[in-house]
Amino acid sequence: MIAQDEQIRVTLPDGSVRQYPKGSTGLDIATQISEGLARNVLAAKVNGVVQDATRPIDQDATVQLLTWNDPEGKATFWHSSAHLLAEALEALYPGVKFGIGPAVETGFYYDVDLNGQPFSQEDFKKVEDKMLELARQKQQYIRKPMSKADAVAYFEEKGDPYKLDLLEGLDDGTITFYTQGDFTDLCRGPHIPNTGFIKAAKIMNVAGAYWRGNEKNKQLTRIYAVTYPKQKELDDYLYVLEEAKKRDHRKLGKELELFAFSEKVGQGLPLWLPKGTMLRERLESFLRKAQIRAGYSPVVTPHIGSKQLYVTSGHWEKYGEDSFQPIKTPDPNEEFLLKPMNCPHHCEIYKSRPRSYRDLPLRLAEFGTVYRYEQSGELHGLTRVRGFTQDDAHIFCRPDQVKDEFMKVIDLVLYVFRSLGFDDYSAQISLRDPENKTKYIGSDELWEKAEAAIIESAAEKGLPTVTELGEAAFYGPKLDFMVRDALGRKWQLGTIQVDYNLPNRFELEYIGSDNQKHRPVMIHRAPFGSLERFIAILIENTAGNFPLWLSPDQIAILPISEKYEDYANDLFFTLQEQDIRGFVDLRDEKIGRKIRDAEVNKVPFMLIVGEKEAADGKVSVRRKGQGDLGSMTIDEFVNIFKAEVKV
């Protein structure tokens, strides 16, 4: 019989409470539940903290046993796989030095310094084979606390400057090492019980990455990889990946002639071609109409602003070093910045005349282009650029109006997502990092008010949310809408932010019903977020088959021969008057080729005209994905088109 003080009470996710000997591990608990569960447990979540499944539990606790099906279990699996990758590299590339190797959403990477040794796609297979060879040894991941002095001595002897750099920021008593097989790494963990869980491995990509993200530091080799507990699961993932490549917005953007990039214009600065511009304008028009219905007033602000504007707002202090540098003028006392944010300009619009409580809420909306210096290695098509347009708006309201206005913006964001088929999204409450408040401006009291407004509004709307510390803007907390793309990656699109701080910095005021001066609250919101990123995800989610109302070319009129070109052109002008966009294909090609090309170019409707159609005043209609819809009058086609195009 085990004494009571040698037992712990464990509360499981189903609410049941069981007793186990003090010092039991997550694996011990799993084994008592079922052998099958024990074979699949990767880590344990103890009192909300993920730890090794082999780590003893010495006090009463809530425990969740994590498997591959749990996001945190998968992250642990991939983090452990990063250590396995490092062990394989150390065996194959003598003298390799290691930076960091975290799990990411679709696998993991390790930043390494190969000391000039080449590494390319031809090397992927030998590294994968070495990883699996080591995995089959079923080496345990062994955790060992380490004093800072001993940790420094270990990496000095090994000659690993990047680990020594990491150690400088760590406090003595918080440092742990993990060892599996012949490889030891500085790591907080957690890790899976042993390498035997890893049954399939694939190196996905290799890229350059500056140490600590600083271009002044050495560029390391970043090796991206993914692992799975079964080969079939890896094969299925790679198949989905190949299918997703067909949807890559960079590939489709070029094929559909939507946008382009030019080295002469500059990296990360997209050029919108005519068809892409039509797509953008349709999206902007759609949101403008919704904003007018919701009481927003349009404004336009310059692409640059005085440096002092951003000193006042705090953007210069927080982001100045990482932004485009000041623009000089012939006047030595003048400095301007490319606009990194629209909000300071909107604050000045608010200040352009005195405001009363009766004027609030004041909702100012702008499709404003902003510029931020993203490092060249981080640029990626339209999803990460240096110049992008935000569907930005700022709501200036009284404190008693904040929650109601915030909930109205949630409704607007969800309306946009529903209208465009963005169903796979999650809402993230982004709060400040309580351990590093120097990153933010404003008092604790104002932050607590802003955070409470977001949390309460999301709860009252019944919006499922996750909370992330440290993801707030420097001036206020956010509700971010994360949308998954065709690869399953999450991107932040829509965002709503509550801000008590910029009104203070800009000394914004309104006269209240008590005839006294009061400070308004700002709500920042952008349902699309970045128009560029939104369109990139839209391209990939639809594979370029846009909703009819958004398609740059909605129709292609295809005359069978040049004899019917006049009828085709007359038809085109008639449909243009009905706000139906498209073109007449006057090429000297057979009709089959014209149809195939229209299909490849994702044109929704093909209108074929020949002798019979011209004689009867009709069209022969084909719908992409449906085939031949038959012959019909022009009015009949317009009715079909209008019924589908409604948003």
Image (cartoon, helix red, strand yellow):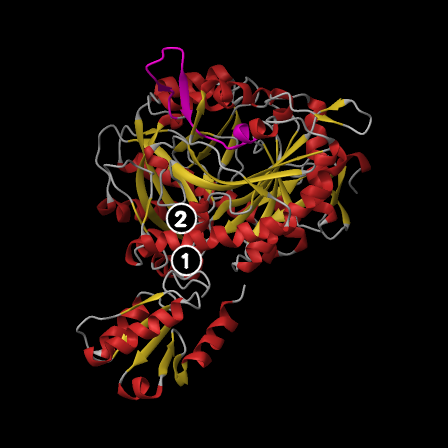
Q: Quadrant of the N terminus?
A: top right
At which x and y percent is residue 551? Answer: 41, 62
As helix, strand or loop, the secondary structure at mark 1 comes to: helix
Q: Which mark is residue 237?
A: 1
The residue positioned 52% from the left and 50% from the top of the image is: 483
Residue, disc 2: 226
Residue type at numbered disc 2: Val
Residue 542 magenta-drawn?
no
Q: Secondary structure at mark 2?
A: strand
Nearest to the observer: residue 266 or residue 250: 266
Nearer to us in this view, 636 or 598 = 636
Are the two marked residues, 1 and 2, in contact with CB atoms closer than 8 angstroms? Answer: yes
Earlier-in-chain disc, 1 versus 2: 2
Q: Residues within 10 Å of mark 2 (few under 14, many from 20)?
A: many
Q: Is residue 292 visible?
A: yes
Residue 139 appears in the rendering? no
Residue 111 rendering spot, x and y as whole percentages: 36, 33
Q: Is residue 641 shown above or below 216?
A: below
Residue range of the region highlighted in magenta in the rendering: 324-346
Q: Looking at the image, is 573 positioned above or below residue 87?
A: below
Q: Residue at x 67, y 50 (%)?
A: 463
Residue 327 colored magenta? yes
Q: Residue furthest left?
A: 588
Image location (x, y in percent) of residue 581: 38, 64
Q: Residue furthest top?
A: 332
Q: Which mark is residue 567?
A: none
